[in-house]
Image (cartoon, rainbow, N blue to C red):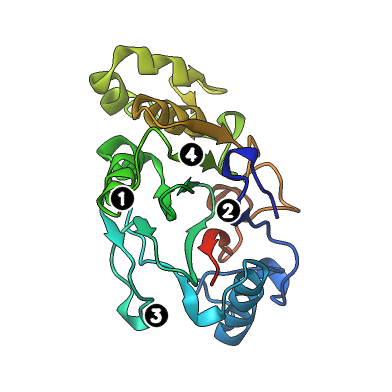
Amino acid sequence: MITLKALDGVRHGFFTREGGVSEGIFASLNCGFGSSDEADRVAENRARVAESLGVTADRLATCHQIHSAEAVIVESVWRREDNPRADGMATRTPGVALGILTADCAPVLFCDPASGTIGAAHAGWRGAVTGILEATVAAMERLGARRDRIRAGVGPCIGQESYEVGPEFPAPFLAEDEANGAFFAPGQREGRFQFDLAGYVAKRLNLLGIAAVESANRDTAAEAQSFYSYRRMCLVGEADYGRQISAIALPL
């Protein structure tokens, strides 16, 4: 489990793939029910995560993530079959943990300890460019958070050296701001680019005027022993992939 100083004082963790009960390509802390892993093993892995954050397994909230800019306020934890289709959450309810599932996208955890408010966002490139970070901060503000007190941590995600994109990919980023060209390095193949997802996410967070932003600077695609990766699965031809979880909690 990785923790960040920006989130000190609040129970949180960017969990690796270590410490669970899943086997084979899902070994070992696979927390994604959307994988073809055995559901009881995924449930046990999630229970271990919840326990380490000081909440019960039924108080760990996750969404049906759809690469959107939709953020929801969590007042009580829903059943898994009722997961909202969203990519951001905010709460100030004690005893609740907010969890983000990833396998290359950037998980972002937020806190404003003064108001007792926390948030979590799933920032793939689509969600980041369309506003999921801004939507999550706005949801926290509706609960009483103040952006000049909000701190954010960007967890492990695919690194720039691993993230090759096509010639059409930079267009929406450059249309937003030509300075975003700084997040694209020449690719290893002609006409391709290497995209810095974590850097772009950190820029969007800093533009919000929040109190602090810190990044884990770990590459999920390059570190097979520590992380699951959709990109790596595609490259090596595996049949499926696990999902690591990043979570933040307000214990009772």
Residue at mark 1: 144
Q: Quadrant of residue 201 in the image?
A: top left
Secondary structure under tag 1 reads loop
For label 3, count other residues whose C-alpha is less than 10 Å away and answer few (under 14), some (14-19) or many (20+).
Answer: few
- First of labels 2, 3 by sequence position: 2
Mark in front: 1 vs 3: 1
Locate the N terminus by quadrant.
bottom right
Residues at circles 1 and 4 in contact by the CB criterion of under 8 Å: no
Which of the 4 image quadrants contains residue 82? Answer: bottom left
Q: Alpha-carbon neighbours of circle 2 within 10 Å: few (<14), some, or many (≥20)?
A: some
Which residue is identified by label 4?
Answer: 151
The amino acid sitting under disc 1 is Gly
User: Which of the two labelled residues, at mark 4 and mark 3, occupies the earlier sequence position?
Assistant: 3
Lower position in the chain sequence, tag 2 or tag 1:
2
Question: From mark 2 to mark 3, how far is it between C-alphas?
Answer: 25 Å
For this rendering, which residue is in front, 113 or 121?
113
Residue at 46 percent of width and 69 percent of height: 94
SS under mark 2: loop
Q: Is residue 182 above or below residue 52?
A: above
| Observer-nearest of 211 and 13 | 211
127 lies above or below 97: above
Name the residue tied to disc 2.
10
